[in-house]
Amino acid sequence: MIIDSHIHYSLPRTCEEVLEALEMTGCEYGNLVAQLSKTRASETLDCLCAKYLSKGKLYTYGSLDVTEYYKMNELGKKQAEHVEKLMACGCDGIKMLEGKPEERKKFPIPDFDSPEFDAYFEYMEKNRIPIVWHINDPEEFWDINKVPEWALRSGWFYDDSFVNNEKQYTQVENVLKKHPNLVVTFAHFYFLSAQLDRLGEMFDKYPNVCVDMAPGIELFENLSKNIEVSRKFFEKYQDRIIYGTDICRLEETPDNDFNLKDTIIRGKLCQEFIVKDKVYIPGDEKSLLGKDDLNLNGLNLPKEIADKIFYKNFLRITGKPKEINVDEVLKEIEREKDRVKFLSSFNNEKCNLSYLETIENIFKTK
């Protein structure tokens, strides 16, 4: 069995398309991780809607309330209350995109180790609610002499106007010191694939910290360079690594094309790297992984370790998909409408509630 723990989804894509992507990549189940939005507040309700229609095939990790970053009135307490409501709706955990440098610049998010966040992290630790947390990006994105051309084209060079990556690592370390039993999976291998000793030290300190394997090209290239060291790392920390692909991106094209080819490439790369000793992935200019071919050394892990990465570790943390509570979801839709209205007013933009009305109609008629 394979569970893809890291999938992005929002309308106008359909639940059927996500299930098709799972089938094409050989996965039985998927976890939709909701992102923040400056106009739509979040993708949480989109993801809950797809989960509702999936007949038990999908999980959902909802996002925090982005409007609270503008209000800054008992932030931690308000986010904890928000999480409690999302879990009542049927969310299985929380996705925090707040650590991506673009998000830190886009929204007025305070430092993670500031007192403003304390009540939230205390609540998450106490209730053992799992978090998928995106912190930083590849370290070369902060160095103009090392940032890849494809990253430059995407606007992923981070100058001094963005948060520093080491500053964020320090903030997270301080959070974990205060909340050592926090159940957290750091996305994209915590961008420490070139610093395995550093990642191992964190695993040794904090028993509930994991990472997922969603690419970044640099993740697989770094691990491939010294495959014997990487294989020993995976053997030692086989209970702390989780399969994920970052698939189902909504392409920025006029017709919002759903790039199934990129989905296939990602699934092939992530799975073959775990179970084969040599991996060849043809490049494709329409894939975020780039137009260049990938020739990599693979981990060639035994089945008992591969199974932990493919599904057992995620199940240990998350369990079975929680049931959707339609009444609670309908209440959350009303709260989300208020958030969208707040953001529209704050940004002096036209308010569009049509996507929420679409979701509301689905929950009211099914």
Image: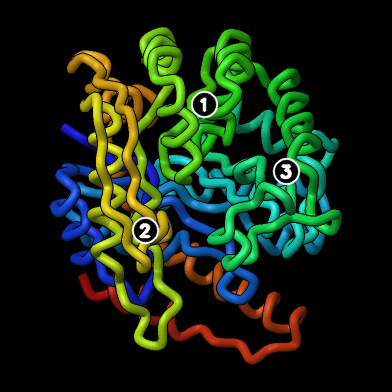
Q: Is residue 11 left or right of residue 158?
A: left
Q: Nearer the viewer, mark 3 or mark 1?
A: 1
Which of the colour schemes (rainbow, by chain, secondary structure, one colour) is used?
A: rainbow
Quarter occupied by the C terminus: bottom left
Type of the residue with mark 3: Lys
Do the numbered discs 3 and 1 sit on residues whose CB atoms are within 8 Å? no
Residue 112, percent across and down? 76, 39
Type of the residue with mark 1: Arg
**Residue that carries the numbered disc 1 in the rendered image:** 128
**Residue that carries the numbered disc 2 in the rendered image:** 48
| Cα–Cα span, label 2 and label 3 | 23 Å
Label whose residue precedes the other's in the sequence (2 or 1): 2
Can you tell which quarter of the image residue 84 is in?
A: top right
Type of the residue with mark 2: Leu
What crowding class fits label 2: few (fewer than 14 Cα within 10 Å), some (14-19), or many (20 or more)?
Answer: many
Q: Secondary structure at mark 1?
A: loop
Label whose residue precedes the other's in the sequence (3 or 1): 3
Q: Secondary structure at mark 2?
A: helix
Can you tell which quarter of the image residue 181 is in?
A: top right
Residue 26, percent across and down? 15, 44
**Residue that carries the numbered disc 3 in the rendered image:** 77
Can residue 308 be seen here?
yes
| Cα–Cα span, label 3 and label 1 | 16 Å
Residue 105, percent across and down? 76, 60
What crowding class fits label 3: few (fewer than 14 Cα within 10 Å), some (14-19), or many (20 or more)?
Answer: some
Q: Is residue 145 left or right of residue 233?
A: right
Can residue 117 be seen here?
no
